[in-house]
């Protein structure tokens, strides 16, 4: 928003490229809207998801640096992770809600990080 629509469009294209390079062809990557993406890493655990999130956290600012030249705030990512073990009966909507809540916790803390949401942590 700060840098205009052209920079925003370029950021989305570059982000999509980084997502393709970071995740397996068998993973599902979807744009939910605006600048929000969702990823489904079938068969992956929290550690694998956190490793990929860290790659994005460090890789995205470098990938987008030329778009934010002169802006000391740059562009960062706020990543929420929610995993469910095999055999879990947690509904997909609840899983997405947990990831979304974790992402907003990161945003409130200033962004540029990732956080894992655990099912038992919900009230």
Image: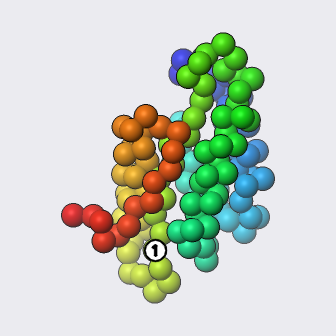
Residue 35 lies, with reference to residue 54, above or below; the image says above
Q: Is residue 96 visible?
A: no
Q: Nearer the viewer, residue 22 or 72?
A: 72
Q: Residue furthest top?
A: 70
* Left or right relative to 97: residue 74: right
Q: Position of residue 67 (x, y in %)?
A: 70, 22
Q: Residue at x 47, y 37 (%)?
A: 111
Q: Residue furthest toward the bottom?
A: 87
Q: Look at the numbered disc 1 and give the secondary structure of its residue.
A: loop
Give the residue at mark 1. 84
One can see residue 19 in this view: yes
- Report the coloring of the rendering: rainbow
Query: In the rendering, at what x and y percent does residue 103 appear?
Result: 43, 48
Quadrant assignment, res 108: top left
Mark 1 Cα-neighbour bin, 10 Å: few <14, some 14–19, many ≥20: some
**In the visual, does 113 lie left or right of 119?**
right
Q: Quadrant of residue 22?
A: bottom right
Return the residue found at the far left. Answer: 123
| Residue drawn at x 35%, y 70% as measured from the top left | 119
Q: Position of residue 14 (x, y in %)?
A: 73, 37
The number of callouts visible is 1
Eyeballing the image, is 97 above or below 59? Answer: below
**Residue drawn at (64%, 58%) of the image:** 52
Quarter of the image containing the C terminus?
bottom left
| Residue situated in front as seen by the camera: 27 or 75 | 75
* Foreground residue among 45 and 72: 72
Q: Residue at x 66, y 13 (%)?
A: 70
């Amino acid at each position: 928003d700060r840098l205009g629509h052209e920079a925003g469009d370029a950021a989305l294209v570059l982000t999509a490229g980084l997502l393709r390079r970071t995740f397996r062809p068998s993973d599902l990557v979807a744009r939910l809207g605006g600048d929000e993406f969702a990823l489904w890493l079938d068969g992956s655990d929290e550690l694998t998801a956190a490793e990929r999130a860290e790659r994005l956290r460090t890789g995205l600012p470098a990938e987008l640096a030329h778009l934010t030249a002169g802006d000391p705030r740059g562009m960062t990512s706020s990543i929420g992770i929610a995993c469910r073990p095999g055999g879990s009966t947690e509904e997909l909507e609840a899983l997405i809600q947990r990831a979304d809540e974790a992402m907003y916790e990161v945003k409130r803390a200033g962004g540029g990080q990732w956080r894992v949401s655990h099912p038992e942590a919900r009230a």
